[in-house]
Image: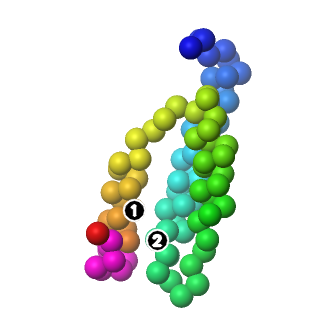
Amino acid sequence: MEPLTGQKLLFGRVLVSMHESLLRDLYNILQRVFDPKPLNPKPILLILNQYIYSNPLFTETDLTNYISELKLGITVRFPGSAS
């Protein structure tokens, strides 16, 4: 793997920042998944898969904490719904 140049490093940081923002938006959408008219998470998932995760400049992140927080949030909002 070649060392990152200034532009590549900056672009990698932008990808990480976009990733964090998209995960926050996704979290908010998924918190309302059991509402009568929930928002569709598909556009955010599409962006994550096609533009963030597939980019070689994006460094992988551990989503374990994110998933745990999401489960906790759904459980608090809708007791008995997340397992």
- What is the count of numbered marks? 2
Which residue is painted at 67% across and 43% down in the image?
A: 51
Q: Secondary structure at mark 1?
A: helix
- Residue that label 1 marks: 70
Q: Is residue 17 visible?
A: no
**To which residue does mark 2 refer?**
31
Horizontal and vertical percent for residue 28? 52, 66
Quadrant (top left, top right, bottom left, bottom right) of the N terminus: top right
**Magenta span: chief secondary structure:** loop
Callout 2–callout 1 Cβ contact below 8 Å: yes
Q: Would you say residue 69 sits in the magenta stretch?
A: no
Structural distance between the alpha carbons of marks 2 and 1: 7 Å
* Residue 33 spot, x, y in % from top left: 49, 75
Residue in view at x 58 percent, y 33 percent? 58
Q: Amino acid at mark 2?
A: Gln
| Extent of the magenta region | 75-82
Which residue is at a point 37% across and 68% down the rendered structure image?
A: 73
Q: Residue flagged by tag 1: what amino acid is it?
A: Leu
Label 1 packing within 10 angstroms: few (<14), some (14-19), many (20+): some
